[in-house]
Amino acid sequence: MTTTTPAENLFRLLDRGVPQWIPFSLDIGSQPGFSSPFARIFHQQTGSYEPAEYFGTDVRCFSVTSQFGGDDPRRLHDPLPAEATFDEWGNAHWAGGEEGTTDRMIPAAGRAKTVADVDELPPPLIDRRPDTSRVKAWHDAGYPVFGYAGSIYEWSWWLRGMEQFLMDLVSAPELAEAVIAKVTAHTTRLALVSARLGIDVLCFYDDAGMQTGMQLSPKLWRRFIKPAWQKVLDAVRAESPKARFFLHSCGRIDAIVPDIVELGFHILHPLQPECMDFEPFYREFGRKIVLAATVSSQKILPFGSPDDVRAEVRRLADIVGDERRAIFMPSNVIQPETPWENVVAFAEEARALRNTAR
């Protein structure tokens, strides 16, 4: 008797077939699904440091790292606290010394006045020779591997600051285009390197929504952001036609879901439960793109009961029915106020549905 592996099951789903079971993950694409405080809770409860192994999820994660490409990111900023940290773009981050909080971000290109100023910003340096032994081991064990592969809109406003970038789109489009071009070039490089190293699903992160609507108008998104995504995905398809694409975009983004489908993303996460109803989007788009069937990390997981969590997983499973064209995931990172029992309930219910399908 031939046993279907999690990788085979997922690829069947992403290639528009009917999977044997609905895959599930506790991660957010390639990003850890547990906040650092909840990761400690997980370790205290289990003695393990590997949630995917402990809970028997269908996905494993490995991401290529990048680092700042210049000599000293502090040169891009006014004086900062000594404890400030810097990302690969040179953006500064400071959370006031509190763990697990949203930090203040100071944009690396916030002081740019001209296109030349943007061009001078050093692109991140990608680690092109990471140790990929885990990727091989997971493939040998039959698991698909998800990996972080970049951003367009989100990284662009990180570089300029959100208010300034949104203003640039309207009043200084040449600056906005320069920032987007720099970001697009790095995202393309990172995605290509990741695909070459055997990452099966390239995970992109580009929050374009608030819970009340888009952060920028759909018209501006289609003018500036959509063509950049087209360039990235076309470049990867030309070299790695078997690569699959995951897009995370929080908020109410219903206006651009048809565009996301048209671009050829394979998975869309999270269809945020607080502002987007999974069922109508599944009815309209579920055969064209895999929609993440997410349990709310904002409401149900932290404030519901284990029975509430189990009921929500079953409700989502009932919507997709025998087509099983979805992936169970949390809607976002699980925070420390979430009861341990609720995470266990989520995993147990997803596994129970898997075992029944098998």
Image: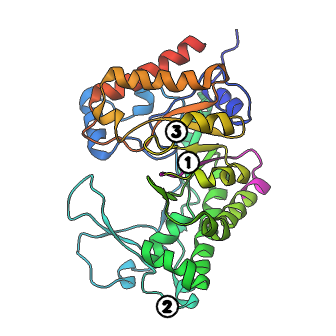
Which numbered disc, 2 or 3, marks the residue that appears first in the sequence?
2
Residue 244 belongs to magenta span: yes
Distance, label 1 to label 2, CA atoms, is: 34 Å
Query: Which label number is shown at residue 147?
Result: 1
167 relative to 210, above or below = below
Q: Quadrant of the C terminus?
A: top right
Quarter of the view holding residue 224:
bottom right
Which amino acid does the dot numbered 3 rest on? Asp
> Is residue 219 inside the magenta stretch?
no
Looking at the image, which residue is at 51% across and 81% down? Answer: 121
In the structure shown, which secondary structural element does the residue marked by tag 1 occupy?
strand
On screen, residue 44 versus residue 91, left or right, reads: left
Q: Residues within 10 Å of mark 1 (few under 14, many from 20)?
A: many
Q: Which mark is residue 47?
A: none
Mark 2 residue crowding within 10 angstroms, few (<14) / some (14–19) / many (20+): few
Residue segment shown in magenta: 236-251
Q: Earlier in the sequence, mark 3 or mark 1?
A: 1
Q: Secondary structure at mark 3?
A: loop
Residue 330, compared with residue 224, is above or below; it is: above
Which residue is the site of mark 3? 277
The extreme top residue here reads 1
